[in-house]
Amino acid sequence: METTSYHIYARDRVLYCNLSEEDFEEKWQLLNVMVGLLKTDYTERDLSYIKLGPKAGVGGPGRVIYKHKWEEDSYWHSTYMIV
């Protein structure tokens, strides 16, 4: 079965790897709330994620189909890439 997975980052640090869409939605929402409420070194602008398509070939890497990050002007920016 072909599945999509997600990786979540805080700056250059991997927080979660290979999440299902359901787990991603839950953790992404929780992290955004946490960085707003807790006093940490991270802000909402430090959080980003990538969405990976199904693996390329047998056991090959997933391909990045969506990348989410902040732009300098504080609006969401998304970049579509084919790897």
Image (cartoon, helix red, strand yellow):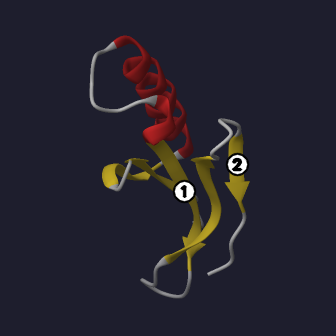
Residue 66 x/y as whole percent: 65, 59
Question: Disc number at residue 80?
Answer: none
Residue at 50% across, 37% down: 45
Which tag, 1 or 2, sits closer to the chain's start? 1
Q: Which residue reaches farthest left?
A: 40
- Quick one: quadrant of the N terminus? bottom right
Residue 21 x/y as whole percent: 56, 44
Q: Is residue 82 above or below residue 53?
A: below
Give the mark count.
Answer: 2
Give the number of the mark in front: 1 or 2.
2
Element type at mark 1? strand
Residue at 44% across, 23% down: 30
45 or 67, which is in the foreground?
A: 45
Residue at 70% across, 48% down: 77
Residue 65 x/y as whole percent: 66, 66
Left/right of residue 31 with respect to residue 15 in the rendered view: right
Residue indicated by mark 2: 77
41 or 22, which is in the foreground?
A: 41
- Quick one: quadrant of the C terminus? bottom right
Q: Is residue 50 visible?
A: yes
Residue indicated by mark 1: 50
Question: Please, what is the three-letter code of the amino acid marked with disc 2?
Answer: His
